[in-house]
Every structure is written in C-alpha cells, then in structure tokens.
Image (cartoon, rainbow, N blue to C red):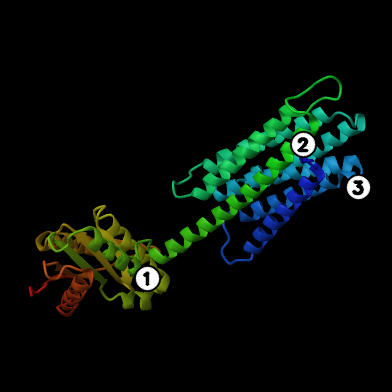
Amino acid sequence: MFRVIFDVQTMLFMNVLIGLCISASLCFSLRDRFTCPGAHYWCASMICSTIGLMFLWLRLYTPLWLSVVLGNGFIVLSYSLLWLGFRQYTKSITQQDRLLMILAPLIAVILFIFLQLDENNLVIRAMLVSYALTGLIAMSIYQALKGRKPSESGRLFCVLALVLTLLCTLVRALTVQKSAGYVGLLDTNMSNVFLMATSGISLLSVGFGVMLISSQWLQQRLYIHATYDALTGVYNRYALIELGDTLELTTDLSIRKWSLAMIDLDHFKLVNDRYGHPVGDQVLQRIATTLKESIRHCDILARYGGEEFVVVLPDCDKNNARIWAERIRKNIEETTMLINDQPLQITVSIGIATSTPTACKLNDVLPMADSALYEAKKAGRNQVHEAILPCV
C-alpha cells in the first residue's frame, strides 16, 4: 500500500500558481475597451490574495512575523476588495465603503502584537483572521445576490464559490487546536491540509465566477447596443426585423389582422438647421416618449432611421389603426415642446397599412406603409394616409 503524504507547503505553492493565472487573466481583460463595473476591484482582489498566499508559502524562508502579518493582511484586503467590486457592480458603492480597506492593516497590526507577545498563540491568530474573513465573505455573498436577475448565472456561480469559502473558513476556526490541552475537530496538520485544498478550489471558483460575470455583462451590453436605439431608447431597425421574424414564427399572421404605422417628423431638417442637432435630438426623444406612452404592451415601437418611427400593431384592423394614428397625430400637433425655454411646434405624417391573408409578413406590409407615408407628405403633411394590401 502507498501512503499519501499531504504537504501543506506544496499545496500552498499550487494555490499561488492558481492565483497568478487568474490574476493574469483578469489583468489582460482590463485592457479591453469595455470593462465590467467592479472588474478593477476584482483584479486587485485576486492579486492581493495571491500575494498573501505567497507570503504564507514563504514561511519557512522568512521570519514568522513577516509571513503571518503580511500573508493574512493581504488575504483580508483581497476580500475587502472583492466586496467593493460587487458594490460597484450593483451601482451602490459610496466613498465611505472604501474605508473597509482599513480593516486589513488593522488585522495585520493586531497579528503583529500577538506575535510579539507569544509566537505560539495560533488559536487566537487563526480565529481572528477566520472571523474577519467570515464577515467579509458574508457581505460579498449578500451583495452578489442583491438585485440578481435569473439570467445572471455568473453571480450565482460566484455566490456558490463564496459559500464554499465561507464554510472552509468556519471549519478552519473550529478545527484549529491549542497547544495546551485543547483539541479541535481535526488535528492541526489535517486542518491546514483541508484549508489549503478547499482554498485552492475556492480561489479557482471565485476567479472563474468574476470572469463569468464580466463576460455576461459584456454580452448584455452588446445585446443592448445591437437591439436598442442609443438616442431614444426604443428598438432599432435591426431589432424590428428580428422581432418581425419572431412574430411570424409564433403567430399565424395569415389569419390574425395586424397593422403597421410609419411615422415621419415633418420638416425635421429645418429644426436641425435652425436650432442645431442637439435640439433635434431632444425632439426625437420627446416624440419617442410620446409614442411609448401611446402604445399597448404587445405593440412594437422602433426607430426605423433618421426621423422615422415604425409601430407594429398586432390584432388591429385598419379602422382601429387609423383611429390610433389620428389620435397620435393630433396629440403631437397640439403639444408645444419647450426646449431650452423655446416653444417648438412639431407635426408628423403617418402612413398605415394592414395585412391581408396573402400579404401578411413584415417585409410585405412595410413598403405599403412607406408608400402611404409618401402620399401623406405629398398631400401636405400632418395627416394620415392608409394603404390596403392588394389581394392576390
């Protein structure tokens, strides 16, 4: 039979290597143009954790006080930075939160004093660090769960890793043994082995968790940029096409009547030329807000391009579509916009088209609505024109 000998120093060295790899990965990710909120804190946290483990590993080659004080001090600092990262990610960080980093040097000073009094007081030192880490980890778990959406699996994974770390820290506090008569749940060597094994797993898991959070944040940001118009906050043209395809797949549009309205701001170029593009942007935002407040939850509103908006009206025949369009046109006409303390009157022209059993796709109805819009503008603007799709 072979006897496995657990070498705490070797396990510490492996944890240092793991920390170096994770820290390097996070440092490289910070060079990207878009970085996740909290990423700088998480990167600093992994670096501090790695430095702390390195000082603990150098215990055989450096004075005991240097290894204990700096090793545990950097580890406490790493979990303070981890919590600050989650505070920044959830947009709840304040200037006062950064005062938590004072805890690390405070713990280091207390450890130094204990070592000067008695180098053999392992229990007091271990329990002091363990309970400090327990509090910081519990705070990080709470912050990571705060406001989490079901799709944010990275935050959940990080929470599970932190729960494992919390349990390991509590086990460490319970299993450390006094040199004079007190026996914990495990002997000292096995306690250290357990701590090193689980801390390596926790370090790897937390590091992977924060990288997963950063990746999901970037994916969400890219989705928003690809789907929503940056100026008005409504869907863009690409999203309109995608939603139209989804509507065709999930709904039998050849049976259900639906309408489409194409809305264009009258003489918008004159607004830009006279008042400047910033004012024109504000006008577009006001019109988008008016349209958002005038549609149902099932309707689709998109900025089609420039000063044109498109509204898809499911389960809406041509009569109801015209009534809705006239109400919108009249509402905008009667509303005086105050922009930079200047009254501004805006009107819109609207072209509407309604589906038929033989022409029921978005690509079929859009050109007809566009043609109706052209007729409305040709007839003098500030009116609604409708186009009926021809039956084939």
Inspect the image, locate mark 2, and give the three-letter code of the amino acid beneath it: Asn
* N-terminal label among 1 and 3: 3
* Residue at the image point whose x is 69% and y is 46% from the top: 200
Query: Is 242 placed left or right of 376 in the picture?
Result: right
Which quarter of the figure is the N terminus placed in? top right
Read off the residue under disc 3.
61
Inspect the image, locate mark 3, and give the three-letter code of the amino acid beneath it: Tyr
Query: Is 61 placed left or right of 54 in the picture?
Result: right
Image location (x, y in percent) of residue 4: 77, 41
* Residue at the image point whose x is 16% and y is 77% from the top: 380
User: Total marks drawn?
Assistant: 3
Asked if 385 appears above or below 7 in the picture, the reply is below
* Residue at the image point whose x is 23% and y is 72% from the top: 363
Residues at circles 3 and 2 in contact by the CB criterion of under 8 Å: no
Inspect the image, locate mark 1, and give the three-letter code of the amino acid beneath it: Gly
Read off the residue under disc 1.
280
Q: Secondary structure at mark 1?
A: helix
Image location (x, y in percent) of residue 354: 14, 66
Query: Is 191 placed left or right of 318 in the picture?
Result: right
The dot on residue 154 is none
* Residue at the image point whose x is 61% and y is 45% from the top: 94
Asked if 375 appears above or below 140 in the picture, the reply is below
Q: Secondary structure at mark 3?
A: loop
Q: Secondary structure at mark 2?
A: helix
Q: Quadrant of residue 172?
A: top right
